[in-house]
Image: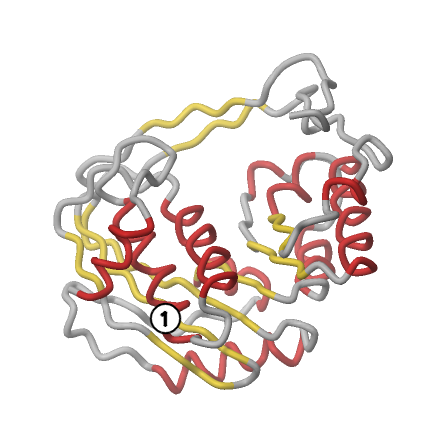
Amino acid sequence: MSHVAYTGQKIGSYFLQQGASRQKSTTVYDRDNTAFSTLKPGDLPWRELLADAAVFHTSGISAAISQSAADAMFEAIDIAEQMGVKVSVDINYRKNLWQYGAEPRATLIRLMQKADIMFGDAIEFEYISDKRPVPFDAVSADYPVDLEGYAKWLDEFYQLCPKCGKMIIGVRSQPAPTHHVLTAMLLDNGHMLHTRLNDITNVIDPVGVGDAFSAGSIHAALHFPEDGQKWLEYALSAATLKNQVPGDFNLSTDQQILDFIKQ
């Protein structure tokens, strides 16, 4: 914890009203004057922090909090690139967080173009491209996914972000608050891979599923760098298991995720 920077007036928080029946979940963020929102370039010794790192991970949320936090994030990315550390980006567009005047789409595209590894869900890819996503209205695991449509859609992003060798998209259908169907696709240096569909009929808590997917992706990138299919299945399995865990964090072990893949 020696490099933690103590700044701001408080720790950031958010308030979540869980969805039920036909009521969607609602989130209210409290980020003003927080430690992260007041972060600025020069506050953290990035070269020391990244000295033994394989991957530097950041997200669209980091860019959305404040201009100074966004500047600090791009400072870290530039240093990571200079040091040969791979840059991992979760697009993670949260409309309610962009309050300081930056244009979200332009900032996120700039961030994406820095990525070696990038992931997001279909809604975020839709926002960036300003194009309707490929339909995914699954209510069970036998839904026929339009893989050709997704391959074409992802290839457009690949042309926009040629540095990005691994582009992962998570896709989710929500027939009900407690019933979700998940799948994922990976454009691996132009080669399309996909997973099966995971039909979850007893969702306990979907908060943090995207983070579990991202964390699973990074873990798999470090442990199965040459096996894109296993990488993708690991990320989706981590996200699937998170739906059964209450709270923000995925508590599944590496072995539990590997066992789930075998099932």
Residue at the extreme top: 9
Q: How many marks can you see?
A: 1
244 horizontally vs 166: left or right? left
Q: Residue at x 48, y 67 (%)?
A: 168
Vertical side of 258 occupied by 65: above or below = above
User: With 81 as the anchor, is 194 left or right in this view?
Assistant: left
Give the quadrant of the N terminus. top right
- Can you say whether 150 is above or below 258 in the image? below
Q: Which quadrant holds the C terminus? A: bottom left
Figure check: 33 above or below 26 = above
- x and y percentages locating residue 167 in the rendered image: 53, 70
Q: Which residue is mark 1?
A: 230
**Colouring method of the image:** secondary structure
In this view, 187 is above or below 108? below
Residue 39 lies in quadrant: top right
Q: Residue at x 31, y 45 (%)?
A: 253
Please state the horizontal and vertical placement of residue 9, each as a whole percent of the image. 69, 12
- Residue 59 rendering spot, x and y as whole percentages: 60, 48
Depth order, front residue of 143/85: 85
Residue at coordinates 66% horizontally, 58% vertically from top-left? Answer: 87
Provide the secondary structure element on which disc 1 rests: helix
Q: Nearer the viewer, residue 229 or 151?
A: 229
Q: Position of residue 249 (x, y in %)?
A: 38, 36
Instruction: In this rendered view, identify the residue nearer to me: 77 or 100.
Output: 77
Q: Residue at x 20, y 66 (%)?
A: 262
> What amino acid is labelled 1 in the image?
Lys
